[in-house]
Amino acid sequence: MIYDSHVHTVLSCDADTTIAQAICAAENKGVGIVVTDHLDVEFPAPLPDFRLDVDRMFLEYSPLRSERVLLGVELGMTESSIGRCREIAASYPFDFVLGSVHVLDGREVDDALYADRDEAEVYREYLTEAARLVEAVDVDALAHIDYPLRTTSRELPFADYAAEFGALFAAMLRQNVCLELNTSRLADGAAYANLLAIYRAYLEAGGRYVTLGSDAHEPQEIADNFGAAAAFLTEAGLIPVHFCQRKMIIDK
Ligand SMILES: [Zn+2]
Ligand SMILES: [Zn+2]
């Protein structure tokens, strides 16, 4: 079974999906899910509270946990919250800890940031910061490597950032951190082609395994673009996996 290893529910402040709706949507699509609600220890004000109540998550969702419904977290990492991130990752019985970089220098990476920062410079800084953070925090996979490109004015080509990607992949492989294929941009042809160059470089660097994540915030988004993702992985020569009790399992 293939797993959607990046699914948000009502325990994320920006999602409305109930756990029952998520389970139902996943069954209809024939995939397993890993629930990964947002836990950004530090998020710039005004604060939408992206801090998952982990105790509540385990209390409410544990009875529903199964081979098809795994419990993880999307841990938003920042330089100044490394200690707290490490502590959270180690303190709960997560199936999967998905590391993210949403914030750079205390500012959210979004179109507002690009109003006064150069897109290329932000992207370079994002990749460099991600390399530092995957070495410092114990995560299983790195989410949406192309996150800054969701809101840039154009696709920034892999070739211009090959050195930064090389350093990031080296750091991930040293720490056994898997790469996520976030499927949210795969329907866009230019994004698909650019991502293919990135994931081929991951393969060349020695990477083999990829988690698939729709980043669904609505039930109908679960396993979105997974058909395209299957073709993508074949083209890239990579193998889909998921994590259970923080051990990597190859999807069959
Ligand atoms: Zn994210
Ligand atoms: Zn997410």
Image (cartoon, grey):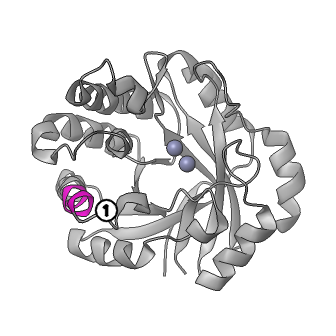
Instruction: Identify the residue shown where x is 66% and y is 24%.
Output: 47
Mark 1 Cβ and ligand 1 under 8 Å apart: no
Name the residue: 65% across, 54% down: 8
Vertical arrangement, residue 127 with respect to residue 14, above or below: above
Q: Position of residue 54 (x, y in %)?
A: 78, 41
Asked if the magenta segment contains residue 191, the reply would be yes
- How crowded is the residue under tag 1: few (<14 C-alpha within 10 Å), some, or many (20+)? some
Q: Quadrant of residue 69?
A: bottom right
Q: x and y percent of residue 141 in the render?
A: 47, 49
Which image quadrant for residue 33?
bottom right
- Residue 216 vs 115, above or below: the answer is below
The total number of labels drawn is 1
Q: Residue furthest left?
A: 159
What predominant SS class does the magenta segment belong to? Answer: helix
Image coordinates for residue 130, horizontal then vertical, percent: 38, 32
**Residue depicted at 29% across the width and 26% down the height:** 122
Is 29 left, or right, of 49 in this rendering?
left
Give the residue drawn at x 57%, y 20%.
Answer: 44
Res 219 seen here? yes
Q: Position of residue 226 (x, y in %)?
A: 44, 74
Above or below for 252 versus 236: below
Residue under numbered circle 1: 208
Residue 193 counted in the magenta span: yes
Depth order, front residue of 83/221: 221
In the picture, measured across the screen, residue 43 lies left or right of residue 100, that is right
**Quadrant occupied by the N terminus:** bottom right
Foreground residue among 160 and 69: 160
Name the kind of residue labelled 1 in the image. Answer: Arg
**Magenta part of the protein: which range?**
190-196
Element under disc 1:
loop
Asked whether the viewer can see residue 66, the reply is no
